[in-house]
Image (cartoon, coloured by chain):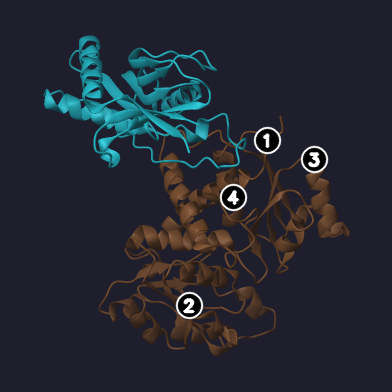
Chain colours: A cyan, B brown
Amino acid sequence: MAKKITLINGGLLNMIIQRLCRQLIENHKDFSSTILIGLQPRGVFFMERIVEEFAKSGHVVKWGIVDPTFYRDDFRIHDKPLLAKSTDMKHSVEGMNVVLIDDVLYTGRTIRAGMEGLMEYGRPKSVELLVLIDRKKGREVPIEATYVGKEVESFDNQRVRVMWKSEGEKEDHVIFLND
Amino acid sequence: MKLSTKHLIAIEPLKKADIDLIFSQADEFKEVLSRPIKKVPSLRDITVANLFFENSTRTRLSFELAEKRLGADVVNFSASTSSVNKGETLIDTVNNILAMKVDMVVMRHASPGACQFLSERTNAVVVNAGDGTHEHPTQGLLDAFSIREKLGEVKGKKVVIVGDITHSRVALSNIYCLQKLGAEVMVCGPTTLIPKHIESLGVKVEHNLQRALEWCDVANMLRIQLERQDAGIPYFPSLREYTELFGLTQDRLNSLGKEIVIMHPGPINRGVEISSEVADGNNSIILNQVENGVAIRMASIFLLAQGIKRVS
């Protein structure tokens, strides 16, 4: 049985998300040439949470959902098959400033695959990466985030999971699981 | 969640969960096919051989497109231009191709059971693209997928398959697939073209097209295989009589007082089993079937390929 430890509770998480939103506003001004892209599966919850936060302050942002599955480098390595999730791209990313969003940055491989998937929809002017949790140790490809909610030191046998209200949790929070 | 099978030989042994899984992935591949770049790199280290021992245009093209859009390397083989004509056996032909490091074989063959035979004797993943009068699993899948797309779900729908049921692998795969998904299935045609004891599969049998159409939500019109009629074994007195009794015309559709979905696996004999007006009409999803064929084949191959472990 994995041991669960709460790393960030609802109140703190809320403050972190508000701070990340302010940083985005500072850098992207009116968002006219910006698009937020949530990475399947769990980056989508985070992206939706950010869009919701922006809506509270009257900011309208374009968004899309990209599934990195087809571009992953671990296809046919694990026993568990990789299954594609929904992609939802109503806007082209051609010439846009893209903010790629995922919940946890660890090895960096999902982000690499996500970027490859993203490029199928055009050539963005720039791509930034926003993550809620950055597990500093464990990077396997040279990818770093532009915006970080919280840096976390962790071991390989630990998992970090962000739980969202929109998936039925009582409140948004982040947990540590020790295997 | 993974497929319960290593090969795709038939629908009969599949579980409903397998079909649901293929459909869920086909939904995502439909999105891929709507992109400006209709290609993903998932299978770039996989080689697929398409072995067509029987003539085929759309199935071979559809498989080839699906394989290429998954990034696989593709080699094609057709019996008419091969050593099969020089007396080589099936297993020798296939072993020679597999010696060239092929990971997956898509095969169409005139003998029922040829794909099963092959799957028991090779390490490659085998996909049945039609084996004699046995099954044509990807056609069964794409037909059910097209019904689901048009009507929202397959469960509870009434589907009639009209035509030559005796010689049809499409009919058999359709029956198994639709029943597993909870549809009611009826077969309709002249008594000579309906196999004896087909009721034992749980399907209704009807010899009157009008009554069948009044019963159904979907009519899948099979091709009358003219080559069989020409081969000196007449299953019905004349084509004209067949068309009169079992041909689907606009007048017949209008007389129903309800809308039904019209399907046809192709190639169509216009004016025989279906009139041009009906085939090209608003209720026809014949071209959607063709489009969905690529997505279904991409999904099936994508899922089956995950059983081929990568060598490092």
User: What subunit carries mark 2?
Assistant: B
Q: Amino acid at mark 4?
A: Phe
Residue positioned 50% across, 87% down in the render: B241
Q: Amino acid at mark 2?
A: Val
Disc 2: which residue: B162
Element class at badge 3: loop
Q: CA distance from mark 2 to mark 1?
A: 44 Å
User: What subunit carries mark 1?
Assistant: B
Q: Residues within 10 Å of mark 4 (few under 14, many from 20)?
A: many
B214 vs B179, left or right, is left
The location of residue A51, given as percent across then percent down, is 22, 28
**Between disc 2 and disc 3, whose residue precedes?**
3
Element class at badge 4: helix
| Marks 3, 1 in one chain | yes
Disc 4: which residue: B63
User: What subunit carries mark 4?
Assistant: B
Element class at badge 1: loop
Asked whether the residues under the numbered discs 1 and 4 touch, taking CB atoms below 8 Å apart as contact, a structural biologist would say: no
**Between disc 4 and disc 3, whose residue precedes?**
4
Q: Amino acid at mark 3?
A: Met
Mark whose residue sits in front, 3 or 1: 1
